[in-house]
Image (spheres, rainbow, N blue to C red):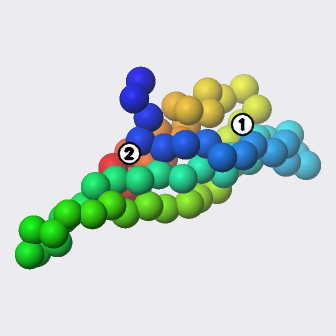
Amino acid sequence: MIKPFKVTKTVVEPEGNIGVHFIATKSASSETNRRGAMSIQAYLSVSADSDIDQEVYNYLKEEWL
């Protein structure tokens, strides 16, 4: 999978979940056809047995992509 994000850090949370810090970037264009990029940094908590990349992708698919 080509990932539109980069996991920058993971931490084990007190309740056992995995905390995932990540950054995602996408291209954007303005009304005047100027091109650029938009980035977000975010934190997501996933269960310990989750596929981290898939969970981040699913989150971004609903909120960002």
**Location of residue 36 (image quadrant):** bottom left
**Residue at (55%, 43%) from the top-left corner?**
6
**Residue at (72%, 26%) from the top-left corner?**
49
Q: Which residue is mark 2?
A: 61
Q: Nearer the viewer, residue 28 or 19?
A: 28
Can you see residue 49?
A: yes
Q: Which residue is mark 1?
A: 47
Which badge, 2 or 1, is on the more N-terminal residue? 1
The three-letter code of the residue at mark 1 reads Ser
Secondary element under disc 2, as helix, strand or loop, is: helix
Task: Residue 12: give x, y in percent of width and height.
Answer: 84, 42
Location of residue 8 with respect to 63 vertically, above or below: above
Q: Looking at the image, is mark 2 or mark 1 nearer the viewer?
A: 2
Q: Is residue 52 left or right of residue 23?
A: right
Residue pushed farthest bottom?
32
**Location of residue 61 (image quadrant):** top left
Quadrant where the image shows the N terminus: top left
Residue pushed farthest left?
32
The three-letter code of the residue at mark 2 reads Lys
Task: Residue 4: give x, y in percent of width and height.
Answer: 41, 41
